[in-house]
């Protein structure tokens, strides 16, 4: 078989959007790009300043994802040359690991002759990540609502309402998703459970129908944000007051520490407010206004003659 290189561009994500814990993900125009080809020996190149500390040996997540594809397909794992570049800051709640995982699975699936469908890649990515929200957004783009029964994902993918953007306040500190998951209780009261079901249902239908009026109410959460709040100075104030500066709704992004606001406004008041509140709490941050990605993981094959 003639060898070729595959290039996959995968968006990062903001997961949960408040009450959609492990259920709702939104893809963002912030990308990880992975190039992969068969090689004489395995080599992993990291490009740009966003991947400091990432392993370049076979423990690398992108390599591990590729290994999973070849093994599951029953093929001999070839040596791979992998080139990774990312705009997604690590361990900030913007889905860097989900994008790397989806990118590795997608690239290897193309190299292996596409033994798996996109849905099978989604199931596989979810079983590795443990929840379908961020991997679903990275794979499919747009807004994804999903339920996982430990084997299969059932999901709906929606396109965002016109003109909605995400303002992300990205603190200058890291918070690993595993650590932030360990902060959560193992059970919830009936009252909190009903609060979660009603708000997640309201949020999903608001996103599906473009009803922006209910977003500030719909994005309220009692499942994860209260337990992660102490790690995020300024979150409570942003949840309570960002609406006065043009936010339609505010949430912790994924497991944090990034805080996102949905907005239709173009003016700089909201980004400035978010940055200044975090700074008042001693947290310098980078503010990015990010449109929603509607494409998801996109791959191109580059034939040898063009390399
Ligand atoms: N492009 C990448 N290549 C390899 N591994 C990555 C890449 N991006 C993220 N990871 C892995 O994912 C970890 C971060 O995952 P996590 O704690 O879930 O934070 P995030 O919210 O950014 O996904 C990194 O420490 C690294 O091990
Ligand atoms: N539902 C998960 C989402 C984690 O997303 P990440 O981008 O922070 O990895 C959670 O809240 O733990």
Image (cartoon, rainbow, N blue to C red):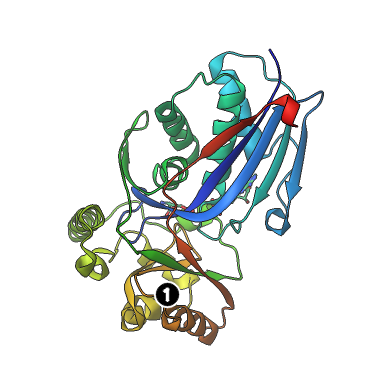
Q: Residue 230: image x %, image y %?
A: 45, 72
- What is the quadrant of residue 175 in the picture? bottom right
- Snapshot quadrant of residue 57: top right
Q: Answer whether residue 80 is visible to the viewer in this image.
A: no
> How far across and how far down the image is residue 16, in percent?
37, 55
Q: Is residue 245 above or below residue 70?
A: below
Label 1: few (<14), some or many (≥20) within 10 Å?
Answer: many
> The N terminus lies in which quarter of the figure?
top right
Residue 248 in view in this figure = yes
Numbered disc 1: secondary structure: helix
Task: Name the foreground residue: 140 vs 92.
Answer: 140
Residue furthest bottom in the image: 280
Q: Position of residue 53 (x, y in %)?
A: 73, 53
The answer to whether residue 218 is left or right of residue 168 is: left
Viewer-side residue, 110 vs 307: 307
Labels in figure, total: 1
Q: Residue at x 59, y 35 (%)?
A: 104
- In the image, the residue with mark 1 has its CB under 8 Å from the nearest atom of ligand 2: no
Please tell me which residue is depicted at 47% across the width and 45% down the height of the picture: 138
Q: Residue 214: horizontal and vertical position, in percent?
A: 20, 67
User: Which residue is denoted by mark 1 in the rendering?
Assistant: 235
Residue that protrudes farthest toward the right in the picture = 40
Say above or below: 226 vs 63.
Answer: below
42 relative position to 185: left or right? right
Residue 84 falls left or right of residue 43: left
């Amino acid at each position: 078989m003639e060898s070729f290189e595959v290039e996959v561009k995968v968006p990062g994500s903001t997961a949960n959007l408040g009450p959609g814990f492990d259920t709702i993900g939104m893809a963002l125009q912030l990308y990880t790009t992975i190039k992969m080809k068969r090689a004489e020996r395995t080599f992993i190149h990291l490009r740009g300043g966003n991947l400091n500390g990432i392993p370049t040996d076979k423990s690398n997540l992108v390599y591990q994802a590729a290994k999973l594809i070849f093994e599951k397909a029953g093929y001999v794992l070839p040596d791979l040359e992998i080139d990774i570049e990312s705009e997604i800051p690590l361990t900030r709640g913007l889905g860097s690991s989900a994008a790397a995982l989806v990118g590795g699975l997608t690239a290897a699936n193309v190299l292996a002759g596409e033994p798996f469908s996109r849905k099978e890649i989604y199931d596989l990515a979810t079983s590795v990540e443990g929840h379908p929200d961020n991997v679903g957004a990275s794979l499919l783009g747009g807004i994804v609502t999903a339920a996982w029964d430990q084997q299969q994902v059932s999901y709906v993918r929606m396109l965002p309402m016109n003109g909605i953007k995400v303002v992300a306040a990205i603190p200058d500190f890291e918070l690993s998703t595993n650590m932030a998951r360990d902060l959560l209780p193992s059970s919830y009261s009936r009252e909190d459970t009903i609060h979660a079901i009603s708000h997640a249902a309201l949020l999903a239908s608001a996103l599906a129908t473009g009803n922006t009026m209910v977003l500030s109410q719909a994005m309220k959460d009692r499942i994860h944000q209260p337990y992660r709040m102490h790690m995020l100075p300024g979150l409570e104030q942003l949840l309570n007051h960002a609406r006065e500066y043009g936010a339609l709704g505010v949430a912790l992004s994924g497991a944090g520490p990034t805080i996102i606001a949905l907005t239709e406004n173009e003016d700089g008041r909201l980004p400035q407010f978010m940055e200044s509140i975090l700074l008042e709490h001693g947290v310098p941050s980078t503010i990015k206004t990010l449109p929603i990605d509607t494409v998801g993981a996109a791959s191109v094959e580059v034939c040898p003659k063009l390399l």
